Image: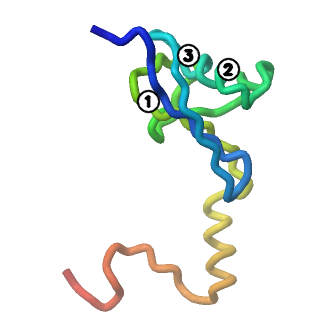
Amino acid sequence: MAPAELAIELFWSPAQGELREQRLTLPDGSTVRDALTASAWFEPARIATLTAGIWGRSASLDTPLREQDRVEVYRPLTVDPKEARRQRFQAAGSRIVTRHRPLGRKA
């Protein structure tokens, strides 16, 4: 039997290095949109433009929630990830190792 209420967590990082967390209790059958509205962090007109996910997987605003879900609100990327890697390489002046094992050792 499903609970009459859902306990969920909502996470949002409005700026780099800042993380907000809120625990919400919502009625059974609530959606991601309902969680964002209940948080009071966002203006109702802005909610439709947000990108959200559940446990790190992108989800639409109409996705139904389950007990103990972790809803995350994502910021848009400010730099293309490939360009950021190039910039780190230029700043370091050496190869950025992406292997899982150290250089020089063979499996």
Q: Quadrant of the N terminus?
A: top left
What residue sits right under mark 2 in the picture? 37
x, y percent for residue 71 = 52, 33
Q: Are marks 1 and 3 in contact (CB under 8 Å)?
A: no
Give the amino acid type for the residue marked by disc 2 in the picture: Thr
x, y percent for residue 33 = 61, 19
Q: Label 2 to label 3, Cα distance in Å?
A: 12 Å
What residue sits right under mark 3 in the picture? 62
Give the amino acid type for the residue marked by disc 3 in the picture: Asp
Nearer-N-terminus badge (2/3): 2
Q: Which mark is residue 42?
A: none
Q: Secondary structure at mark 2?
A: helix
Q: Secondary structure at mark 1?
A: loop
Q: Nearer the viewer, mark 1 or mark 3?
A: 1
Image: 53 above or below 62: below
> Which residue is located at x 75 percent, y 28 percent?
42
